[in-house]
Image (tube, grey):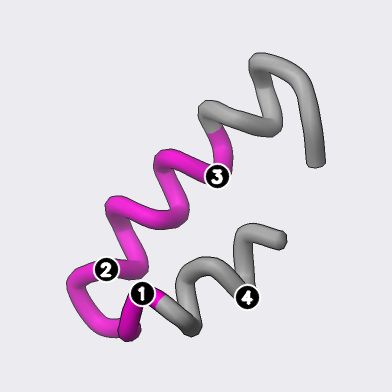
Amino acid sequence: MHGPLGDQLISFLKKKASKSLSPVQVLNIAS
């Protein structure tokens, strides 16, 4: 995803997922 909405969603997912996933997994999900 790209654009403002995509960036906001990726940031949200990273913050939420960082509690239970490693950074690599978060990046894989967000990509």
Q: Earlier in the sequence, mark 4 or mark 1?
A: 1
Q: Amino acid at mark 3?
A: Ile
Say which residue label 3 marks: 10
Say which residue label 2 marks: 18
Q: Which residues are magenta?
A: 9-23
Prevailing secondary structure of the magenta residues: helix
Q: Are marks 4 and 1 in contact (CB under 8 Å)?
A: no
Other-residue count near label 2 (Cα within 10 Å), few / some / many at <14 / 14–19 / ≥20: some
Q: Is residue 5 left or right of residue 13?
A: right
Q: Earlier in the sequence, mark 2 or mark 4?
A: 2
Q: Are marks 1 and 2 in contact (CB under 8 Å)?
A: yes
Q: Quadrant of the rendered structure where residue 17 is?
A: bottom left
Q: Amino acid at mark 4?
A: Asn
Q: Are marks 2 and 4 in contact (CB under 8 Å)?
A: no
Q: Earlier in the sequence, mark 2 or mark 3?
A: 3
Give me the C-alpha separation between circle 3 and circle 4.
11 Å
Name the quarter where the C terminus is drawn: bottom right
Q: Earlier in the sequence, mark 3 or mark 1?
A: 3
Q: Amino acid at mark 2?
A: Ser
